[in-house]
Image (cartoon, rainbow, N blue to C red):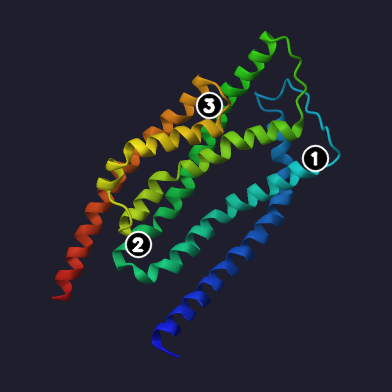
Amino acid sequence: MTEKEMSVYDHIGELRKRLIYIVVFFFLAMVGGFFLAEPIIVYLQHADEAKELTMNSFRPADPIKIYMQFAFIIAFVITSPIILYQLWAFISPGLYEKERKVTLSYIPISVFLFLVGISFSYFILFPFVFDFMGRLADRLDINQVIGINEYFQFLFQLTLPFGLLFQMPVVIMFLTRLGIVTPMFLVKVRKYAYFVLLVIGAFITPPELLSHMMVTLPLFGLYEISILVSKGAYRKAKKAEMLYQNEQK
């Protein structure tokens, strides 16, 4: 067996070990999610946006479906730092020592941005869109009968994508430090990126212009922040590379 083949097998074995860690921790977090799901569901049903609504179940399986979805989402949020750490541990041998320390610090930043994205969409975007839908139904003389499954699916549709999209600066910074993207490239493809973000915003929000703009404008801002972050990460990566080359001479 050649050294190269051993290297491939070593990488596969290391990846399998990292995946096992993630699966085991996710299973434990899922158990915790079963205990946390019920109080969170009850709390959200009595929040300002929903306290005047009567939640209805149109199918016998709706309550257990919502319960399992919340348990899964809670488990994913709890496990996300572990997932990011295992990803970092898998790729860290290929990084410089300073890059390892810097990229490790991305994990708490990523979790923080995810929570910021969720908070922004839940406390700002969701109330506006939900209120707009209610006022539109009143103007059209439509009596809304809210299903608990439909209510929470709508909530998930608006909040979870924002939590992921708020990862953009961290992902760009990480890819820049790996040399996969550069700030020059991000500036060059800005108009295409804006178009993609417009399409994503259209998928997230209802077909209504003001709600669409409330989603896409923050996404444009995140992209511009990502360019600034990429510029800083690019300069640091070049400086670290020059220092490493000088040390090797």
Above or below: residue 157 compared with residue 243: above
- Comes first in the chain, label 2 or label 1: 1
Above or below: residue 58 compared with residue 106: above
Residue 174 shown left or right of residue 80 in the figure: left
Task: Identify which residue is drawn at 67% across, 60% down.
Answer: 28
Name the image quarter holding residue 224.
top left
Residue 39 shown left or right of residue 120 in the figure: right
What's the amino acid at mark 1?
A: Pro
Cβ–Cβ under 8 Å for marks 1 and 3: no
Q: Nearer the viewer, residue 222 or 120?
A: 222
Cβ–Cβ under 8 Å for marks 2 and 1: no
Q: Which residue is mark 3?
A: 124
Task: Identify which residue is drawn at 34% across, 35% down.
Answer: 191
**Callout in the foreground (2, 1):** 1
Name the image quarter holding residue 103.
bottom left
Residue situated furthest bottom in the rendering: 1
Q: Nearer the viewer, residue 179 or 23?
A: 179
- Comes first in the chain, label 3 or label 2: 2
Q: Tell me how many marks there are.
A: 3
Q: Position of residue 5 (x, y in %)?
A: 44, 83
Q: Nearer the viewer, residue 230 or 89?
A: 230
- Comes first in the chain, label 1 or label 3: 1
